[in-house]
Image: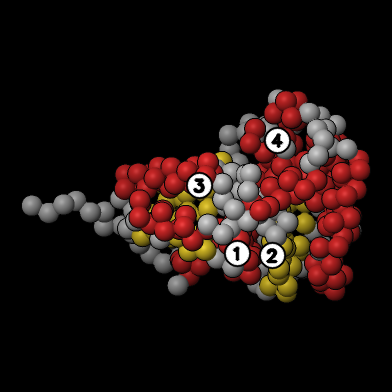
Amino acid sequence: MSLHHPHHQRLALIDMGTNTFHLLIVELPERRGDEPRVLLRTKVGVKLGEGGISQGEIVPAAFDRALHTLQAFQEEIELHQVTQVRATATSAMRVARNGPELVKAIFEQTGIQVEVIAGAREAELICLGIRQAVRLGQEPHLLMDIGGGSVEFIIANADTIFWKQSFEIGAQRLLDQFFRHDPMHADDVRAEQEYLRSVLVPMLSAAEHFRPISLVGASGSFDTLGDLQAARQGEPLTQQPPARDISLDSFYHSYDQLLSTTHAERVAMPGMTPMRADMIVVACVLIDFVLKACRLTHITSSAYALKEGLLAEMLAQ
């Protein structure tokens, strides 16, 4: 008697971010070029960088949350009879002194081998993921993924990456450094802007050179800005499209609101993800800085990022 094995290839993609861990399980198509079937798409706010990322340490509570989350992911992987697992970790695991220890603990307890990827590789995968959601065309766009630990900037069109760089200035780091009052004081906003002006010199000169025509944002902060906009417009929040436009008016409406409210008031905003209620404030200071410095007037939010890029890359092989 033989055990039942799915004859389909099933793939699990895990993206272990500094703030959020994502799991995507797909069934690969039998014919090349067909779309994979999504069996599960889930995310958990692990906050791996909380309390220690600015000191280069994953604190014990965050270490435990990461392990528990991967154990739960492993149960889903077994339940869905997955045939191949790809797990990637980014900024927090790159810089934390005890990152390798967490990689080892995850492998020992779940059998999942985590690959810690470099910032440049992360930027490439994010670009590939965004291209699955947003039609970029031939003009260059500025792609931006605000993570908890790092922020990736990529200047690209539909088929070429003109420039890319990962900066260790993610929302958890900005929060640790500049979120000194709640609501955030004007002085703190200015301090963050000054800091960004000095750190983002390479991005600003690349933008000056390649002249991107719009901002395409991936990851949690942009998802939340899209949700805040949808809630204001009375749209259902259940179905997040792969790409959506966020008008400049809508962004500044949210930004002004976020700057003038307390944590409790932000959590109560329709469309807000509670875990993101503080990070989004410092993230919006960053988005505002980028829009103005690069003279961009159009924002597209992409629900696809690193794990969709990894999937696209694997399907192309």
The numbered mark, 3 or 2, whose residue comes first in the sequence reads: 3
Disc 2, SS: strand
The numbered mark, 4 or 3, whose residue comes first in the sequence reads: 3
Q: Which residue is drawn at 87% across and 52% down?
A: 193
Q: Does the CB distance between marks 2 and 1 fall below 8 Å?
A: yes
Q: How far apart are marks 1 and 4 (CA)?
A: 25 Å
- The x and y percentages for residue 118 are 59, 68
At label 1, the amino acid type is Glu
Disc 4, SS: loop
At label 3, the amino acid type is Phe
Q: Mark 4 points at which residue?
A: 277
Q: How crowded is mark 4: few (under 14 residues within 10 Å), some or many (20 or more)?
A: many
Q: Residue furthest left?
A: 1
Q: In which quarter of the image is residue 123?
A: bottom right
Q: Name the residue under label 2.
A: 166
Q: Is residue 4 above or below residue 152?
A: above
The numbered mark, 1 or 4, whose residue comes first in the sequence reads: 1
Q: Name the residue under label 1.
A: 122
The numbered mark, 2 or 1, whose residue comes first in the sequence reads: 1
Instruction: Tell me, for residue 63, which label it has, or none.
Output: 3
Label 3 or label 2, whichever lies nearer to me, is 3
Q: Distance between the residues labelled 1 and 3?
A: 22 Å
At label 4, the amino acid type is Ala
Disc 1, SS: helix
Q: Distance between the residues labelled 3 and 2?
A: 24 Å
Left or right: residue 59 compared with residue 68: right
